[in-house]
Structures are given as C-alpha cells and as structure tokens.
Image (cartoon, rainbow, N blue to C red):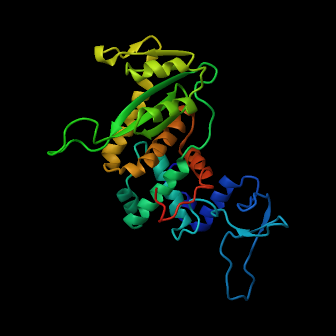
Amino acid sequence: MNSLTAPYFHDDEAARTYLEGVRWPNGPICPHCKAEGGWKIESKEGTKNKVRPGLYKCASNECRKPFSVTVGTVFERSKIPLSKWLAAAFLLCSSKKGISAHQLHRTLGVTYKTAWFLAHRIRFAMTDTGGGLMGSGGGAVEADETYIGRKPGRNMRAGAGHKHQVFALVERGGKVKSRHVTNFTQIKETLASTVSPEATLYTDQAKMYRKLGKDFAKHESVNHSIKEYARGEAHTNTIEGVFSVFKRGMIGTYQHCGEQHLKRYLAEFDFRYNHRAALEINDKARVDHCLEGIGGKRLTYRTPN
C-alpha cells in the first residue's frame, strides 16, 4: 500500500474485503455479543429486496443479530463509500505533517464538509486507549510543555494567555503521549497515570518539575536559560523534536484549530510518531493499525468532539 492505486481504494467490495481481513483475521466477530463466527447473508435470486453487501448473522443462539464489519465503528451507517474511508485513512497515516480537509476534499472528490467529517473520525480511531506505564524498569522519559494557537494580533498582547497549552511525555525509543492541559493539577495527574515511579524523568528547569520529579526514581533537568541543552544523558531533545513536527503540521497544514478539537489533532500526531518508520512500521502497517482502532469509537455529526 504505497500509493492510492490499490483496488480497495477504488472498489467498495474490495475495500470491505480488505477491512474484514484487518479487523477479523480469524473470521467474523459479532459486535453485539462478541461471539466468534457467523455466516454471510446472501440475496436470493428472484427477490426484489437486495441484502446489504457484507452482512453477516451472528452464530450465537442467544444473539442471532445481523452485523457487518463497520457496525460499532467510526464507519457505521456512513453514506461515504468505504473505499474513500480507506483512502482518507491512508492519506492521514502517511502524511508526516497531516493533510488538510481542503486537500482531502480535492483528492477524494468529496465535499469539504465530508472531508472534515472523515478526518476527525479517523483521528478518533487513532486515539490510544491502552498501553502500560512509560519508563517501567528504569527507562528514560522526557516531559515538556508547549503552546499552540494564534499569534498576537493588533489588539492582543504577546504571551501564552491566548494560546493552548500542550503537555507531552515521550519514552526514549518508545511512544509519546500528549494532552491539552489548562493547569498544574492536570500535568501532575498525567505524570502520575502515565509514567512509572521506576522511571528516570528528564525535564527543563521549570520550577514545577522540582516537586513532580520527587515521585520518580531519578530526575534530571537542563537549564535552557543558560543555553544548556544537554548534559550527558540529561536533555529534552526527543520531546522537542516531537513538538517541532507537531507545530509545523498545525501551522503549515491545519492553520486553524479550535480548543474543542485539539485533542483529536494531538491523537493524530501521537499515532504517527508511535507507529513511525524508525520502529520498522511502514505506511501499510500504519494504516492497518489505524483500522484496528476503529471499533467502539462511533461518532455522529451531532457529537463532533
């Protein structure tokens, strides 16, 4: 899957078959009762009403409900062709700095509103809902915060007051987890719920880390105010690199982001970093990981956030 020439990007039946292979490698699983197995419901010859493509019936005697591979997912009840869903997922997963809704609507031949809907649902599918604690066994974890938002205008003072604060944690050689925060308590809670007490925490010289760092096996910081960016293993260069890609994408590609949607964009950039080429994950595998995460995350037009 190195381009949009694959059949499942243009043919809905091929797209459905591909998605079933990704989500059900060992056969159908009923989304209603989680029972394994089921049989495909086919249209009978001579009947006026055709059966919806890809429809199965649960094999469990207690359930017997019909279902398809899109039930209970971000694709459920969508009138958008499944092939376009897969193409949009490929474009979002393979573009390092993201792809705008305007570009999606031109590339896929859909309306801007449809492209915006597609992108946000796929970002929702990218959301990481699991994983163990970072730094378990004494691993190195970097913590830092940055700001994203509009630049000060004529009637706006410079500073961070008009911007949104993002706090992120990255395990060296591992994953990143980012969160939109508004106060110190949220930063403290994120550290406690995400990083193992066994970890070595690396930060900058911000005063809040002096107290927070005491909860971990080891804490080291670098003083950027005196142009100290690395001292042996102590540095925050990894997380600074993550922020660099994130900011370039938000400023150069997306340009505008409402506070209520920031968590979706963070999930997108986190997902691509956590499934990056350096971890030997190519574009096809990255898309497959995204498609594996579409279950149990249905959103409608009435719940865009």
- Which residue ends up furthest to the top in the rendered image? 232
Q: Is residue 166 left or right of residue 152?
A: right
Q: Residue furthest front?
A: 185
The picture quadrant where one finds residue 7 is bottom right
User: Is 84 left, or right, of 51 in this rendering?
Assistant: left
Report the number of numbered marks: 0
In the image, 9 versus 54, the foreground residue is 54
- Which residue is outermost to the left? 154
Tell me residue 1's x, y (percent): 55, 50
Identity of the residue drawn at 35% across and 44% down: 250
- Would you say residue 225 is visible in this rendering? yes
Query: Is residue 5 visible to the viewer in this orientation of the structure?
Result: no
Q: In this image, 302 relative to 11: left or right? A: left
Q: Position of residue 123 (x, y in %)?
A: 49, 51
Out of 276 and 120, give the one closest to the viewer. 120
Residue in the picture at 75% in, 70% down: 65
Q: Is residue 256 above or below residue 109?
A: above
Is residue 207 depicted above or below 94 in this figure?
Answer: above
Residue 276: x, y in percent? Answer: 52, 37
Residue 215 position within the rendered picture, expressed as x and y whole percent measured from the top left: 54, 20
